[in-house]
Amino acid sequence: MSATRGFGVDIGGSGIKGCVVDFEAGALDGERLRVPTPQPSTPDAVADVVAGIVDKFGWDGPVGVTLPCVMKRGVALSAANVDKAWIGTDAAALFAERLGRAKEEVVVLNDADAAGLAEMRFGAGAGKDGVVVLLTFGTGIGSAVFLNGELVPNTEFGHLEVDGHDAEKRAAASVKEDKDLSWEQWAARVNRYLHVLEGLVWPDLIIAGGGVSKKAHKWLPLLDVRTPIVPATLKNDAGIVGAAAAASAGLRP
Ligand code: BGC
């Protein structure tokens, strides 16, 4: 019988959030706990916070953890908005040790991949076949690609080169804030980015995620793209929900 509850931790540049997840509801089971990300966000310092969060909930089952990193078999191969010391770190082994668990009970995956898993199972992507691309617009741009519901892990579409620039440096939600762009100005940048993306990947559906998806009505209607595009439905909880789901399924990206 598959588990009805799991535990997910979502690690970002400014906050580390964790909660028990109810797989029947496809949502958090109660209030999540958020702890500011330690600075510098070294593997040891972050692992202490993760262990503290899991302890607070008294959770003793499998744990899923996201990192804003390319993840291969538990090892981080890049690091965006977290300390560069993550690169080359066996994050799954580190968390397993801190959490007092077998390595098989801890799954570490890319943050956007986790958000995508949550949307495909419980949100805007449920039941969608073909090629689905989830994009998270936040500090950077994260991506998750699914073919008939199966994740193709570690796509890094936030780093597509668009007009000579790293795409996320022009079109992430943080750029809208930093440069004080209007919705129209920012949507024009996102539109240009999506044209490049859809010309390379030809998705059947794009799901727009990240905090800014809460205001989807302000910018999705301004886009002029070929691919159907819909807002994510799990909003800020997608990373936690997807991480928990990955761990309970024993996924090993
Ligand atoms: C990173 C991705 C990450 C995304 C969102 C990008 O800068 O390269 O790995 O998923 O930011 O955090």
Image (tube, rainbow, N blue to C red):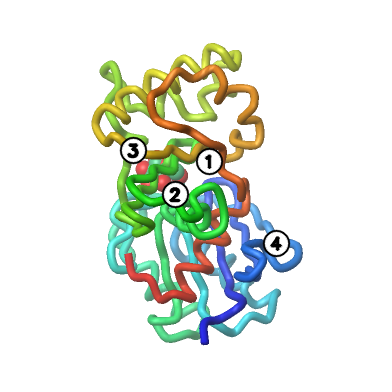
Q: In which quarter of the image is residue 55?
A: bottom right
User: For the residue carrying disc 2, how many other residues have a C-alpha within 10 Å: few (<14), some (14-19), or many (20+)?
Assistant: many
Report the disc number at residue 209. 1
Which is more toward the observer, 10 or 116? 116
**Label 3: which residue?**
203
Locate the C terminus by quadrant.
Answer: bottom left
Q: Earlier in the sequence, mark 4 or mark 2?
A: 4
Q: Which of marks 1 and 4 is nearer the N terminus?
A: 4
User: For the residue carrying disc 3, how many other residues have a C-alpha within 10 Å: few (<14), some (14-19), or many (20+)?
Assistant: many
Give the side of residue 231 with respect to residue 247, left or right. Answer: right
Task: Answer yes or no: disc 3 within 8 Å of ligand 1.
Answer: no
Task: Answer yes or no: disc 2 within 8 Å of ligand 1.
Answer: yes
- Residue situated furthest right in the rendering: 31
Which amino acid type is marked by label 3? Pro
Across and down, in percent, residue 194 comes to 38, 26
The residues tagged by marks 1 and 4 sit, at their Cα atoms, a distance apart of 21 Å
Residue 80 seen: no
Between marks 3 and 1 in the image, the one whose residue lies nearer the viewer: 3
Report the disc number at residue 33. 4
The residues tagged by marks 1 and 2 sit, at their Cα atoms, a distance apart of 9 Å
Q: Is mark 2 on a helix, strand or loop?
A: helix
Which amino acid type is marked by label 1? Gly
Q: In this view, does 155 lie above or below 189?
A: below
User: For the residue carrying disc 4, how many other residues have a C-alpha within 10 Å: few (<14), some (14-19), or many (20+)?
Assistant: some
Q: Which of marks 4 and 3 is nearer the N terminus?
A: 4
Q: Earlier in the sequence, mark 1 or mark 2?
A: 2
Which amino acid type is marked by label 2? Ala
Which amino acid type is marked by label 4? Leu
The residues tagged by marks 4 and 3 sit, at their Cα atoms, a distance apart of 35 Å
User: For the residue carrying disc 1, how many other residues have a C-alpha within 10 Å: few (<14), some (14-19), or many (20+)?
Assistant: many
Q: Which of marks 3 and 1 is nearer the N terminus?
A: 3
